[in-house]
Amino acid sequence: MLRVGLTGGVGAGKSTVATRLAEHGAVVVDADRIAREVVEPGTEGLAELVTAFGEDILTATGALDRQALAAKAFASDEARRTLNAITHPRIGARTAELIGEAAPDAVVVHDVPLLVEGGLAPHYHVVVVVDAPVETRVRRLVSARGMAEDDARARIAAQATEADRRAVADVWLDNGGHEDAVLSEVDSLWADRLVPFEANIRLHRPRAASSPRLVPHDPAWPVQAARAIARIRAAVGDRARRVDHIGSTSVPGLLAKDVLDLQLTVDSLDRADELADALTAAGFPPAAGDWRDDAQDGTGTWPKRFHYGADPCRAVNLHVRSPETPAWRLALLFAEWLRQNPGERDAYAAVKEGLADAHAHDGTVEPYAEEKQGWVNAAFRRAEDWAARSGWTPEG
Ligand SMILES: CC(C)(COP(=O)(O)OP(=O)(O)OC[C@H]1O[C@@H](n2cnc3c(N)ncnc32)[C@H](O)[C@@H]1O)[C@@H](O)C(=O)NCCC(=O)NCCS
Ligand SMILES: Nc1ncnc2c1ncn2[C@@H]1O[C@H](COP(=O)(O)OP(=O)(O)OP(=O)(O)O)[C@@H](O)[C@H]1O
């Protein structure tokens, strides 16, 4: 099952996007609809709202007068907190039930306005944010939905900011223009990302091979790594010690292949094996085979586990290592040493570029590969000296 979180400010166009995804075959779980269900006449939820906000939030027939409640609830932070405390746990329980009922091969789209506010992002494989300028949203809510302008603005003020939403967005859909434009982006998202992502998780299939091309450092890499790390943490909880962004993409200013390397630290490889299913469910299935790191001094090999990110649009390699192996510490040290020593970083970049050029022009890559390995082996010794001088330890 693929879990997609769909969010955006009030009136941005979530329902428009969700409807299109449903047409493609997604199972849409609509938080606003569940929010209505849990306060229907006769529910405990409605009774608690009346106790908190008074009888005048009811219509003559005893149903919830939504406008009357909105007027009270969006008037102050305290009132909104009271509303949320009554409704959100009930919405959460019903949501879990509905998602649990979806088929194993479903793409579940959770249309949830308060995804960012609720800190829910790490629980989805993909977070999609729909956005439009505030004034456009107000205009649409007033003209197409008949909402009072004050109400629209009060809700916008009560919600997350654009910057908050950007931090969690794997996909940003701009719905400031014509509806057709965003719908065609949704069609591509479905075909190019969501469908293959779901299949990769279900079949334990790695994403398609990524390009071996070196590209300049992208400042989005650490941000994307932080999102992947948050997902892994949410999946494994305290069964793992830590998750770090390692490798060349973690070094600002260093060119790299567009693959994020992450290291999950576990007490032992038995523990790593216990976590395999949870990592798969989170979108990081294990790669088949016996994975090992070579000792730099040629004295042996150290076992590890290796998982791939299944997202076809975001290449991730997840190395699961135990601190019992020197490779664990070296991975953390090498990245930190390059981040702290720009001269060494630039020297490493030059060696990598030499290797890439050799690949580009002829088949004789070996001398460059040897040169790179020689440089790296010497670099490890310099990194160790630096660690001893600066007092660096993996524990920070
Ligand atoms: C206050 C209520 C009765 C107003 O009903 P109304 O029919 O006017 O609006 P509706 O429920 O369709 O919501 C429309 C939009 O308002 C915004 N909104 C609703 N509740 C909240 C809230 N507590 N905080 C911030 N924004 C909210 C969302 O963007 C939502 O998509 C209703 O929104 C409600 O019960 N809210 C509490 C439950 C909730 O938090 N729902 C949001 C999704 S979980
Ligand atoms: N690109 C667009 N151009 C014009 N109108 C649009 C566009 N996208 C959506 N709308 C209209 O704007 C209104 C709000 O869109 P929609 O209902 O999809 O937003 P929403 O984010 O789901 O809103 P809410 O937060 O209230 O649930 C709707 O009436 C919709 O038809």
Image (cartoon, rainbow, N blue to C red):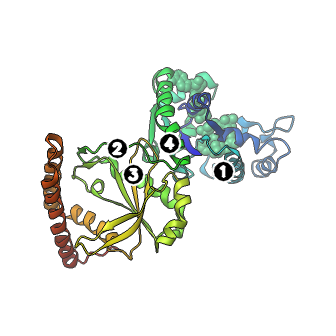
> Which comes sooner in the sequence, label 2 or label 3?
2
Foreground mark, 1 or 3, reads 3
Residue drawn 52% across the image and 37% down it: 195
Which circle's residue, 1 or 3, is located before the other in the chain? 1
Q: Which residue is mark 4?
A: 197
Q: Measure the alpha-carbon separation of dots 4 and 1.
A: 33 Å
Q: Are marks 3 and 4 in contact (CB under 8 Å)?
A: no
| Residue 392 point in image, percent of width and height | 26, 75
Residue 73 in view = no
Tags 1 and 2 in contact by the CB under 8 Å rule? no
Horizontal placement of 203 versus 333: left or right? right
- Image quadrant for the C terminus? bottom left
3D distance between C-alphas at marks 2 and 3: 10 Å
**Real-space Cα separation, disc 4 to disc 2, in angstroms:** 15 Å
Task: Identify the disc placed on residue 316.
Answer: 3
Question: Within the image, what quadrant is residue 13 found in?
Answer: top right
**Position of residue 197 in the picture relative to residue 347 (left or right):** right
Which residue is found at the position 56% from the left and 53% from the top? 281
Ligand 2 within 8 Å of disc 2? The answer is no
**Residue on which disc 2 sits:** 210
Q: Is mark 3 within 8 Å of ligand 2?
A: no
Q: Identify the element where label 3 is drawn.
A: strand
Task: Report the Cα–Cα distance between label 1 and label 3.
Answer: 37 Å
SS at mark 1?
A: helix
Q: Give the residue pinned by disc 1.
A: 84
Query: Disc 1 and disc 2: Cα gap in Å?
Result: 44 Å
Query: Three-letter amino acid code at disc 4?
Result: Phe
Q: Are marks 4 and 1 in contact (CB under 8 Å)?
A: no
Instruction: Tell me the amino acid under the disc marked 2.
Output: Ser
